[in-house]
Image (cartoon, rainbow, N blue to C red):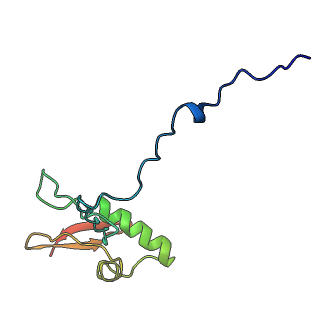
Amino acid sequence: MLAVGCNKKNQSAETPAAPPPSTQPDASQPAPAAQPTAVNPAPAAAANTTNGLPDVRPLNGALMEWVMQNQRRPASFEEFAASANIRIPPLPPGKKYTLNGRGLISIVDR
């Protein structure tokens, strides 16, 4: 009778299996510090290099998000600033933020 078998060799019997990589941290190495998460959802407006005033585009983006969440336009810039939970960049003396006729934020003289 013919005994035909598989020609595969049992590799586990011939060579020992390598131990699985350790998932435990090395006790001799300090654990990495946790990175704090950002609390401010909207970035601060960057200064415009041509006139030294903040760029209002990020503020207008935050305003559009505010309008979508509240389903209305704010009555004033102050209402938006008080409830938007974003950092409003300071302005130079004699300037103020306002909502223009198109409902967008602009910078005007006081």
Give coordinates of residue 52: x percent, y percent: 11, 58
Residue 66 seen in render: yes
Query: Which residue is at the front of the view, 86 or 74?
Result: 86
Q: How many marks?
A: 0
Residue 103 seen in render: no
Say which quarter of the image contains residue 30: bottom left
Residue nearest the observer in this picture, 76 or 8: 8
Q: Does residue 15 sit above or below 92 in this rendering?
A: above
Q: Residue at x 28, y 63 (%)?
A: 43
- The quadrant of the picture occupied by the C terminus is bottom left
Q: Is residue 1 above or below residue 48?
A: above
On the image, which quarter does residue 97 sit in? bottom left
- In the rendered image, the quadrant that contains the N terminus is top right
Question: Outermost residue toward the top?
Answer: 2
Identify the residue at the far left of this view.
93
In this rendering, position of residue 67 left or right of residue 59: right
Whether 30 is drawn above or below 40: the answer is: above
At horizontal 88% and vertical 16% (from top left) the residue drawn is 2
Residue at 56%, 31% in the rendered image: 14
Residue at 34%, 78% (x, y): give it: 80
* Quadrant in the rendering for residue 27: bottom left
Judged from this view, the residue extending furthest toward the right is 1
The x, y position of residue 19, in whole percent, is 46, 45
Q: Residue 95 in the image: x percent, y percent?
A: 14, 71
Tell whether 40 sits left or right of 50: right
How far across and down, in percent of the image, does residue 7 sit?
Answer: 72, 20
Residue 21 lies, with reference to residue 24, above or below; the image says: above
